[in-house]
Image (spheres, rainbow, N blue to C red):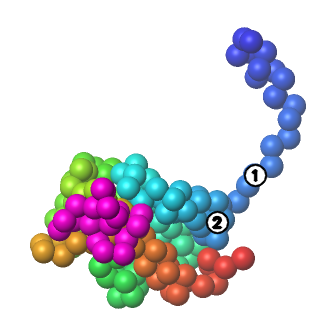
């Protein structure tokens, strides 16, 4: 089919504008992306996408009038929020700049196999973890990316309940 034919057939269609308020962005973009990551916690692609979607919730909140978002999030969930921010920006820009409390370069994450026979890796897998996941390191500390996503989402909901409910 020729492009002009497609365009002429759609010219008379009435298109309604769909709003994207913070609660819409959360429901339609963030939560499905995080759920996909939950179902495949060893996926680097889903880890990075979940962090990007969650971090940019701040932009939707700011457009809706919220103030001091990053400060509030750092106060409520400092490690989780800073990890999500670092992964988002480090992925998009290859690496983070000096404004990030947690440095991250795309590819710095580490796979963590689940802890069951035949798959578990001593010193990497976590006993009781049957899904595995992806970690980033901050010195000797390991930060589970999925856990950071969940804690950051919980902090957003605590700090901005009226904008994220509905």
110 on left or right of 156: left
Describe the element under mark 1 as helix, strand or loop: loop
Badge 1 local density, few (<14 within 10 Å), some, or many (20+)? few
**Magenta region:** 114-131
Closest to the observer: 13 or 53?
Answer: 53
Describe the element under mark 2 as helix, strand or loop: helix
Are discs 1 and 2 less than 8 Å apart at CB?
no
Name the residue located 29 percent from the left edge and 72 percent from the top edge. Answer: 126
Badge 2 local density, few (<14 within 10 Å), some, or many (20+)? some
Instruction: Quadrant for residue 97, please give it.
Output: bottom left
> Is residue 137 shown above or below 29?
below
| Residue at the farthest top position | 2
Name the residue located 24 percent from the left edge and 50 percent from the top edge. Answer: 107
Can the viewer see residue 67 in this picture? no
Q: Specify the quadrant that holds the C terminus.
A: bottom right
Q: What residue is pinned by disc 1? A: 17
Q: Position of residue 102 (x, y in %)?
A: 21, 70
Instruction: Quadrant for residue 27, please give it.
Output: bottom right
Measure the C-alpha gap from mark 1 to mark 2.
Answer: 17 Å
| Membership of 118 in magenta stretch | yes
Q: Position of residue 55 (x, y in %)?
A: 43, 66
Q: What residue is pinned by disc 2? A: 27
Q: Position of residue 39 (x, y in %)?
A: 51, 59
Q: Specify the quadrant that holds the N terminus.
A: top right
| Membership of 19 in magenta stretch | no
Q: Position of residue 18 (x, y in %)?
A: 73, 55
166 on left or right of 83: right
């Amino acid at each position: 089919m020729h492009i002009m034919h497609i365009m002429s057939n759609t010219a008379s269609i009435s298109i309604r504008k769909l709003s994207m308020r913070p609660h819409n962005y959360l429901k339609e973009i963030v939560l499905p992306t995080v759920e996909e990551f939950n179902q495949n916690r060893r996926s680097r692609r889903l880890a990075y996408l979940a962090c990007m979607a969650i971090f940019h919730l701040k932009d939707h909140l700011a457009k809706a009038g919220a103030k001091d978002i990053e400060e509030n999030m750092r106060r409520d969930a400092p490690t989780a929020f800073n990890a999500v921010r670092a992964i988002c920006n480090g992925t998009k820009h290859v690496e983070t700049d000096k404004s990030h409390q947690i440095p991250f370069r795309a590819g710095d994450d580490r796979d963590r196999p689940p802890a069951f026979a035949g798959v578990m890796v001593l010193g990497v897998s976590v006993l009781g973890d049957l899904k595995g996941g992806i970690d980033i390191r901050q010195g000797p500390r390991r930060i589970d990316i999925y856990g950071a996503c969940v804690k950051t989402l919980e902090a957003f909901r605590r700090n901005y309940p009226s904008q994220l409910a509905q």
